[in-house]
Amino acid sequence: MGETKQLWWKDAVMYQIYPKSFLDTNGDGIGDLEGIIEKLDYLQELGIKGIWLSPVYRSPQDDNGYDIADYQDIDPMFGTMEDMLRLIEEGKKRDIRIIMDLVLNHSSDEHRWFLEAKKSKDNPYHDYYVWRDGEEGVPPNDMTSCFGGSAWEWVPELKQYYFHQFSKKQPDLNWENEKVRQELYAMIRWWMDKGLGGFRLDVIDCIAKEPDKKITGNGPRLHEFIQEMSSQTFGKSEFLTVGETWGATPEIARKYSNPDGSEFSMVFQFEHIMLDQDGGEKWDLKELDLVELKKVLSKWQKELYQKGWNSLFWDNHDLPRAVSRFGNDNEYRVESAKMLATVLHGMQGTPYIYQGEELGMTNVSYELSEYRDIELLNMYQERMEKGYKEEEIMKSIYAKGRDNARTPMQWSDEKEAGFTTGTPWIKVNPNYKEINAKSQIHDENSIFSYYKKLVQMRKEYAILVEGSYELLMEEDPDIFTYVRRLFDEKLLVVANFHGVEREYDLPKEFEGATKILCNYQEEVAGKLKPYEARIYYIG
Ligand code: GLC
Ligand code: CA
């Protein structure tokens, strides 16, 4: 260890909570802050050190809280400000920090600023948003929203359009306006004073947009804005900051996560998440090529080594369930969920577990009327109008729809999976009798217990935090294996990514090494069973 104190998030594992679907304590069918407080002991048992909380601010919920109407208030649906402060306190008692989700690219159209902005062109808040003059029916350009349709919304009273990269209830904030930036920084400081542990910064690479040049991601002033924000707020503190950056390359990510602390602690990059899509559209499905996946993940390991910091994740509230997407959610659900966890937690960076991932929760195939997500429902409409076959559309939804991740957390085999005593806002996955927390917590062979071991290992083995990374068997179509090295120590992760048995011999330099983790009880010499994963260590 060097002289500088290690940053707390380097050997820690984070856990993402989607509050609406976590635990409902008052029977209204919607998860709440009280529910999170109730489950802190469960999370402490798992060993995580921080909770990334998807938005709980006051919001009309057009995009499940990613449309914020008041940054300094809690939505009554989730509880009160008092509950929020209690969550922070109760978290502290268990050494768990709360990371809030900051949506700075846009607000809700019901935010006070936007209500003012809409009143007249000379209202002091008008310039808080992005407006262009125009004529009804002729938007300034052909830019489209991420949720479908034009990115421009006409306001007849003003004879102007406002810009929205997401739904029309999510008008983009104008970061060119210094006052907007100062308001946001003041709000960040206000939250910091409440004892928060950090922020996840929603679509942060889109804030420096220049719609006249059709620029959304990675705008020219992006890093200037981020550095300004950092220096006036979280700066070089203990705060964990993680940017959501769909457009990051390793080079850009080295800026975001520069160890000098000038921007963020780390970023979420999504290159490995876009490999099973055909072109730019996530809905156009393509089979995942393991060789490509290995290349991408290894590139990020190498290129940020000692120059930045990775976040490690397979899924989140916008993505399908990891085991359904990258593993096998049928016959080998347990084995493949553990295998995926092994591959991810063996790398350098800060791992994020998405609620239910630690149980091996799976995707769903619902009737259209049972879905709730605005993105998926808009896509369905749009593709139906374009003449796609309904069957094809549903196939895309089953594979990629965001609601896969948003079905209620499966706590037990009781009614509604123990999530609520009322009617859940979205249907519970019918497999909850088989897959639930209650049956796994005390089972030492469960996915939950396996995750617990991995979380613990990251604290015990410095090599997992600091070690270099080298990919082996690059072109192998089934096996994902890499070595970590730190001075005289060596650690090997080897995983069979597929459902076929494979011949396998340990590399020479690992002969005699200690096997410190495996997802099967017994091993067959010279072979890897379907989805088998192991970790070896030489100290
Ligand atoms: C991010 C969020 C997503 C949200 C979008 C707009 O991608 O993760 O859930 O819809 O930003 O705020
Ligand atoms: Ca509730």
Image (tube, rainbow, N blue to C red):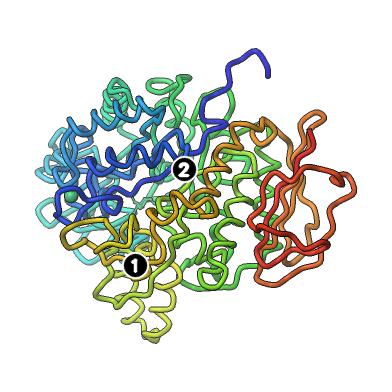
Which residue bears the numbered disc 1? 429
Whether residue 86 appears in this view of the structure is yes
| The C terminus - image quarter | top right
Residue 335: x and y in percent read: 59, 62
Secondary structure state at the residue bearing disc 1: loop
Residue 513: x and y in percent read: 81, 43
Residue in the image at 29% along x and 61% along y? 417
Other-residue count near label 1 (Cα within 10 Å), few / some / many at <14 / 14–19 / ≥20: many
Label drawn at residue 219: 2
* Residue 477 shown left or right of residue 315 in the figure: right
The residue nearer to you, when weighing 516 against 483, is 516
The first of marks 1 and 2 along the sequence is 2
Residue in the image at 80% along x and 28% along y? 487
- Residue type (three-letter) at the residue carrying disc 1: Asn
Residue 512: x and y in percent read: 85, 44
Residue 418: x and y in percent read: 27, 57
